[in-house]
Image (tube, rainbow, N blue to C red):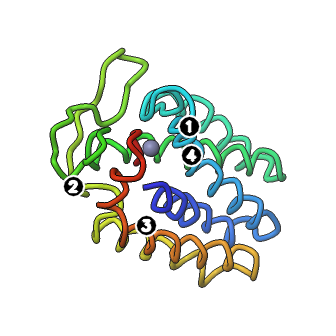
């Protein structure tokens, strides 16, 4: 779920609070954006494929991380946080359900598309479906560093995301009734 991906990105970016405090907020905002970014393909293109690159996002992520380590200024830090969060999002989608309208029915074998091999990675279903109780638990746990380590802006975004995630989890199974298109 998009909130979990954003929270995971934020938790990773929180190492910047220790390593590069002056760029911690930049890292946090870029990580939240990068964590959410792949799911924009819900709106256009094919979900879990058009903007999901479980392998290829690492190509810009590694040099950006190296650049951020050598020259810890705003731009490399932001790029590193963005691409790292997007890469992890794409990889993590394979640990959940497949891309289907009612993922708890577990009928899809399309977890996330691997553009490098030109094939779908099968869903592992460690998290049964987006918005499942275990998904909300992950969102909440990964949100802790963002809430504890950051100032007001990031805290507010974090809290708001957890509230939205909880609301989504509550109505998740009714979503297909209202949105006939794929949504996850
Ligand atoms: Zn996704």
Q: Earlier in the sequence, mark 4 or mark 3?
A: 4
**Residue 121 occupies which quadrant of the picture?**
top left
Compared across the picture, whether 176 is left or right of 166 comes to left
> Disc 4 beta carbon < 8 A from ligand 1?
no
**Residue 167 occupies which quadrant of the picture?**
bottom left
**Farthest front residue?**
178
* Residue at 79 percent of width and 63 percent of height: 23
* For residue 70, above or below residue 147: above
Image mark for residue 43:
1
Circle 1 or circle 2, nearest the eye: 1
Circle 2 or circle 3, nearest the eye: 3
Q: Earlier in the sequence, mark 3 or mark 1?
A: 1
* Residue at 43 percent of width and 66 percent of height: 168
Image mark for residue 84:
4
Q: Are marks 4 and 3 in contact (CB under 8 Å)?
A: no
Q: Position of residue 127 (x, y in %)?
A: 25, 57
* Residue at 54 percent of width and 66 percent of height: 11
Between 25 and 183, the residue placed more toward the observer is 183
Q: CA distance from mark 4 to mark 1?
A: 22 Å
Q: Residues within 10 Å of mark 1 (few under 14, many from 20)?
A: few
Secondary structure type for disc 3: helix
Circle 4 or circle 1, nearest the eye: 1
């Amino acid at each position: 779920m998009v909130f979990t991906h954003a929270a995971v990105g934020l938790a990773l970016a929180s190492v910047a609070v220790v390593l590069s405090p002056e760029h911690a907020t930049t890292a946090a905002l870029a990580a939240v954006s990068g964590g959410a970014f792949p799911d924009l393909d819900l709106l256009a293109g094919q979900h879990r494929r058009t903007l999901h690159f479980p392998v290829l996002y690492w190509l810009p992520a590694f040099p950006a991380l190296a650049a951020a380590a050598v020259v810890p200024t705003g731009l490399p830090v932001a790029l590193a946080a963005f691409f790292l969060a997007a890469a992890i999002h794409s990889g993590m989608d394979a640990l959940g359900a497949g891309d289907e309208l009612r993922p708890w029915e577990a009928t899809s074998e399309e977890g996330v598309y691997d553009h490098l091999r030109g094939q779908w990675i099968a869903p592992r279903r460690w998290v049964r479906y987006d918005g499942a109780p275990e998904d909300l638990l992950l969102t909440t746990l990964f949100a802790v560093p963002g809430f504890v380590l950051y100032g007001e802006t990031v805290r507010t975004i974090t809290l708001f995301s957890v509230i939205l995630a909880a609301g989504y989890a509550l109505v998740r199974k009714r979503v297909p009734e209202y949105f006939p298109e794929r949504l996850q």
